[in-house]
Amino acid sequence: MEKGTGRITLFNGSADFGPLPPSFSATGNGKGTPNLSAGPEDCADEFFDWPRYERDMEDVVTQSSLMDGDSQASPPALTTGSSVTALRDNDNDDDCVMTDVAPQAPELPIVWPKVSDAQLPREQEIHIFIMPSGETQGPSPPPTPNTGQFAPSPISHIPDSPSPPPSTRGRTVKKPEQTKKVRDKGACFHCRIGRVACDDDAVCVKCINMCEKLGGPLAQKICIRKTLSQTLGTAQNRWNWESQCFRPSLEQFIESRVPIKLLVSFPSKPGRCELEVDARAFKTHYGGGDPASVVILPIEGLSEERMYAWAASQVLTESEKGFQACVEELLQGYERNNTLDKAAGNFLEHKKHKILKRLMLNLLHMMHMWKIWSSGPFVIRQVLDNGNGQPTSMGFQSIQNHLRRHAEQAMSSLERHILGDIDGYLSSTESGKEDTSLSSVLQVAMWVSLWQIILIYRESLGSMSPRQQTLGSDETTHNSTTHKREIFRDTTKQLFDSVVVIYSEIFRSAKTLKAIRDAGQEVFGNDKDLHAIFTEAWRTRFDFCE
């Protein structure tokens, strides 16, 4: 593979943000064709192996790769013969394991989800399915005074359910000191998800054994002990890695203070699916110039519901349906048709069902806001007295900044709840208590959810978009923006790595993959349209290797 092609490097500490080669497509594999399964047992096609991954995911920032060689390894075969090393060690002789579950099904060789490097220009990637604004949102907050601070937007999420009372089951701790060390350090994702004992070494023995045939350094990268919430930390509004949005004072308005009506549309389809906003013109002085610009005042009101509906309406103008668009449509369909409740039947009070219902709605809202945050320059027209719109020559960077700041605040709040719900799903002790039908419903819903967060992080790292322009250009502002950008990139990179590890641990067995691939309409509440979208998503799922 050629260097300097804008590849994301997983587990290598950095990411490149250069242009991607035009040959990549977001509709299937790297060659622009769908990734079709070869046969009914071709479940392993969903994954790729580590050596192949490390060779291809080359760090173009440092121009280095952890794995030498240019040839690509063959994907692991879906076999259970004697040549396959068991990946999960169910040795529970010590007392560090927190829960007991039934023996697991035979596992695949070490495999990972195929995260494609395919990336089209940002304006060509907006594919979502229309859905009326949900009724779970509360009323918009009262107008915010025009102060120097950017007012926080309301948090759009389903509130967390009250925590159940702690279990009163007694437990004998045979090795209290070792157990305390593991609890203090935290079990790695591999041991936590597999419900096996972890140790207190820097890299646990089970991760070392799992990666023995693939090389020692890999064990250090997949032995992640921090939960997603711990990795996220306590930073507020982390998606705003630019300087603060400029807010004019009243005396800076020029001529009339009568609102100017503007129509804002995404660059992929200018003039269609427009968001109507009221703005005012003002003058300011930055960088030696004195341009007329436009800003959306908080008193004009721009609710999150309107922004959600605006982003969702874009699907009506899009015709290309690749894997990413299918995942987004699945999220839309789950919420629009109350699919998870219909499919769960009599298990509505199941803990994992309630977590997933909350998780998927928050992910849907985050995806909507991410569409606005990651968009290229919006197309803006001014509404004339006769009701027609015409292109405006006034500057509109402040409008873009305002819309993105609004999206950033919502995304930062939603992300915290999303990652907390994923942590809660993994720690749930109800595993194995659901029947086969509910298990399939939960597996498919989690498959869709993890892919959506993987895609958001992947696309954000791939381009570090939006490449926002600040109204300030002084050195202090530049240094502050650079520092915040680096923090955002590093945190997103760690979260992306962790979610990929979680994905690979949950969906690693042939039995699980087959259950997802063969999911019938009943898994989607007998919604044949949603089932058809899922079938297309499985058919066009990203293929990492060309």
Image (spheres, helix red, strand yellow):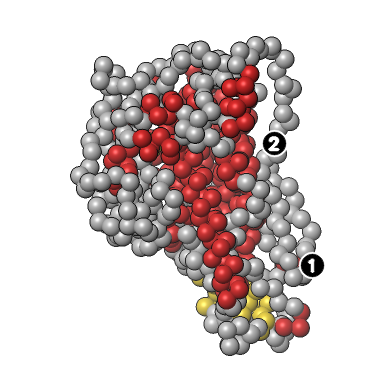
> Horizontally, is 354 left or right of 494 in the view?
right
Q: CA distance from mark 1 to mark 2?
A: 30 Å
Question: Which amino acid does the dot numbered 2 rest on?
Answer: Asp
Please state the horizontal and vertical placement of residue 513, each as a whole percent of the image: 38, 27
Can residue 140 be seen from the camera position used here? yes
The quarter of the picture where residue 429 lies is top right
Question: Which amino acid does the dot numbered 1 rest on?
Answer: Pro
Q: Which mark is residue 135?
A: none
Residue positioned 46% across, 32% down in the render: 203
> Horizontally, is 66 left or right of 505 in the view?
left
Q: Which secondary structure lies at badge 1?
A: loop
Residue positioned 41% across, 60% down in the render: 17
The quarter of the picture where residue 423 lies is top right
- Which residue matches tag 2? 160
Foreground residue, 283 or 337?
283
Residue positioned 66% across, 53% down in the render: 236
- Which residue matches tag 1? 145
Disc 1 packing (10 Å; few <14; some 14–19; many ≥20): few
Please state the horizontal and vertical placement of residue 224, each as a whole percent of the image: 50, 36
Which of the two discs, 1 and 2, labels the residue nearer the N terminus?
A: 1
Residue positioned 58% across, 32% down in the render: 185
Please state the horizontal and vertical placement of residue 256, each as a whole percent of the image: 72, 84
Disc 2 packing (10 Å; few <14; some 14–19; many ≥20): few
Foreground residue, 135 or 417?
417
